[in-house]
Amino acid sequence: MRLVLNLNPVRTAPSLVNKPRVPAALGFHTTATTTTTLTSTHLQTRTWRNSSGSNSRHPISRTAATNTSAMASSASAPKPFSPSSSPSSSTPQAQPGPEDARIGEILDFWFALPPASWFGAPSEAFPTAAALDGVIRQRFGAVMAEARARALDGDADSDVKGEGEGWARTPRGALALLLLLDQFPRNAHRGTADAFATDAHAVEVAVRAIARGFDRAFGGEGEGDGNGEGGSLLHRIFFYLPLCHAEDLTAQVAAVALARDLLAACPAAAPERPMLESTVGFFARHRDAVLRLGRFPARNAALGRPSTDAEVAFLRERPEGW
């Protein structure tokens, strides 16, 4: 069993989908309020077989709702990444066109940095976070604006030729798009509301990418078509960070589960191991903040939200507050 988290309720007919229950074992409840929040009402489940022919289950399914008695039609759910599969006789299959050169530029730039630099640590090239922020604004500001306007996505679910040519249709494209929507805004717009303006969009892209196995195309597993995209396990962190950044408990529980499974996939002597161990703790602290407060209070000033007494006390304990 693998899980598809569909974050597009507007395009899904309400009559086709029952609202799944969040398992009581998780000890929390969610309520649908807007289409920009990942909640239990967005969860759908579907089963497919992996390239070896056996049923596979993504680790995110541990946090999913379990009511599978009535689901949306399979046409409305994202398709697992499998470009080598045979096209049906009735529907012409889309093959991704040539990769946009900007995808490689984004990935080469970001993953050439020392991993600690991703989260604000100084490096030889960028002795301060502000130095890195400025380069991102100058070099990637225009393509970030395209991503914010949803000009790069394409129709991530389309298998019809001529449609779905956007970045979200391939592992590398989805990863680059997630950097533009989730990480780069935190650098380019640090301390302002624009740092979080595309968070909901990033969650949509991330969940669909994870559901299609795009995250596992990096780090050697090559799930989907059997051919990986290279890179390291650290690349996968950026598929999961949008969930970690979401002010939503369902997303937070999923993010921690994914981070733990990523660590479990890493050999004990691998050079990525310390960073992945740190990532699990980082994700868990985000989850605990949302469990305790329902949001990240360090964002309050930028977003014009008044802080509660509990949030003020929390920020005294943990000034980063996210």
Image: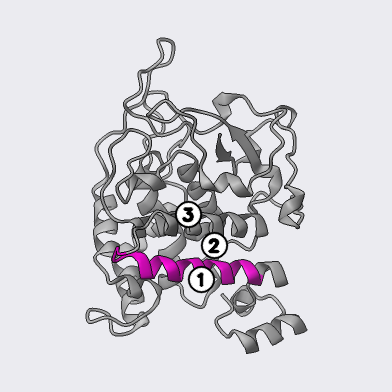
**Which residue in the structure is indicated by mark 3?**
261
Mark 2, residue position: 244
Amino acid carrying label 3: it is Asp
Residue 55, image x and y in percent? 49, 30
Q: Position of residue 230 (x, y in %)?
A: 25, 49
Question: Which residue is located at x 49 percent, y 35 percent?
Answer: 56
**Left-right relation of 10 to 60:** right
The residue that label 1 is drawn on is: 282
Please report the bounds of the magenta region as a residue range.
269-289
Near-viewer residue (195 or 84): 84
Q: Where residue 200 appears, x then y in whole percent? A: 57, 55
The main secondary structure of the magenta stretch is helix
Measuring 36% from the left and 75% from the top, which residue is drawn there? 133
**Which-is-in-front pick, marks 1 and 3?**
3
SS at mark 3 in the image:
helix
Above or below, comparing residue 215 to residue 50 in the picture: below
198 relative to 126 in the view: left or right? right
Residue 67, image quadrant: top right
Q: Report the residue at 36% width, 26% height from top.
A: 94
In terms of secondary structure, where does tag 2 sit?
A: helix
The label on residue 322 is none
What sort of colour scheme is used for the picture?
one colour
The amino acid beneath tag 1 is Phe
Q: Quadrant of residue 90?
A: top left
Quadrant for the C terminus, please.
bottom right
Q: Is residue 143 above or below residue 216?
A: below
Label 2: few (<14), some or many (≥20) within 10 Å? many
Decide which of 68, 171 is in the foreground and name it: 68
Q: Are marks 2 and 1 in contact (CB under 8 Å)?
A: yes
Q: CA distance from mark 2 to mark 1?
A: 9 Å
Q: In the image, what residue occupies the spot 55% across and 31% down?
A: 77
